Amino acid sequence: MRADGTRVKGLSPIVQALPYIMPRRYDAQNWANDYADETILKDYIRQKRREGRVVTHMSVLAAAYYKAVLENPKLNYFVVNRRVYRRNHFCFSFVILKTRADGTPDETVIKIFLQPEDTVFTISQRVREQIRRNLEAAHNNRTDWFASMAFSIPGLARVVFGLAYHLDLHGLLPRWVIDLSPFHTSVFITNLASINTSYIYHHCYEFGTTSVFVCMGRPVPDPVVPGRRRMPLGVVMDERIATGIEYSRFFAAFGRYLRNPACLETRLDGRETEAEPGEVGV
């Protein structure tokens, strides 16, 4: 019945039991730290800029994550009301800083949907366009509009968010609400390196369907290789959506793509681009 996913059948008894043993997402959170080779990422970003292409840490990370998910689809599962669902799309949410019309700092959340034919370049373009639009002081995205509406009348927010929570619990939340909610996402990414802050382990929200939260921290010297730097990643994940070996395979692929970002320049699903008549496929 859910608009954003299909219930997974045929799970092993222990996997079916986990959401009953750990009914809340914060019960099932595991923490892990990983890192991206900052030297490789910076060299790649600079090389692309010399070629006239703009890519960012966020777009590389999102592309590598999605490519690894396409190979390990259980990382796009989620649990609601003790049921495991297969998400029928992939998206990621992230927070940006903006300035209000009066000059005071503010935050807003952006959510971007990806497709198997995306590349690091199309993702980067979409991210930059959304950031540009949302940095405008007068611009409010649909998420901001919904939140403003909920708080426009005293007491309305309690009713609106309480109703949304219970509708979501029973798979009745409308798709338009799910699409604007940043908490209904495949992965939530935060870039604390952009404000020169170390990484943290950010909890996965109980409201919504976020199963994984990735935090990018301020790059630090590599303790093993002198002269190189690494970007630490704080990862929090819902252990109910995948087994340890499945998470292990995912993170192995994720790390492999971060170490070789050039592999993200073609379709992330690995399929060849269909050629136009008279052209050779690439």
Image: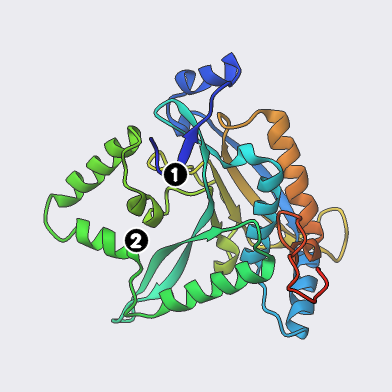
Is 79 located above or below residue 254 in the figure?
Answer: above
Q: Residue at x 76, y 50 (%)?
A: 255
Residue type beneath disc 2: Thr
Count of numbered tags: 2
**Residue 87 image point, x, y percent:** 52, 42
Residue 4 tag number: 1
Question: Against 173, is 273 above or below?
Answer: below
Taking the spot 32% from the left edge, 43% from the top edge, the residue there is 173
> Depth check: 32 or 62 in front?
62
Q: Residues within 10 Å of mark 1 (few under 14, many from 20)?
A: many
| Up-down relation of residue 278 to residue 218 (above or below) | below
Tell me the quarter of the picture where residue 1 sits: top left
Q: Work out whether residue 207 or residue 114 is closer to the camera in this orientation and state it.
A: 114
Q: Which mark is residue 121?
A: none
- Report how far apart the C-alphas of labels 2 and 1 lie in the structure: 17 Å
Residue at the spot of label 2: 143
226 with respect to 86 (left or right):
right
| Type of amino acid under label 1 | Asp
Residue 123 is situated, as x and y percent measured from the top left of the image, at 61, 67
Image position of 48 with respect to 74: above or below? below
In the displayed structure image, the side of residue 20 where residue 73 appears, left or right:
right
Residue positioned most to the front: 277
Q: Could you say which quadrant of the image residue 146 lies in?
A: bottom left
Name which residue lies at 47% across and 40% down. 5
Indicate the secondary structure of the residue bearing disc 1. loop
Q: Which residue occupies 86% across, 66% down?
A: 227
Q: Are marks 2 and 1 in contact (CB under 8 Å)?
A: no
172 and 107: which one is in front? 172
Q: Earlier in the sequence, mark 2 or mark 1?
A: 1
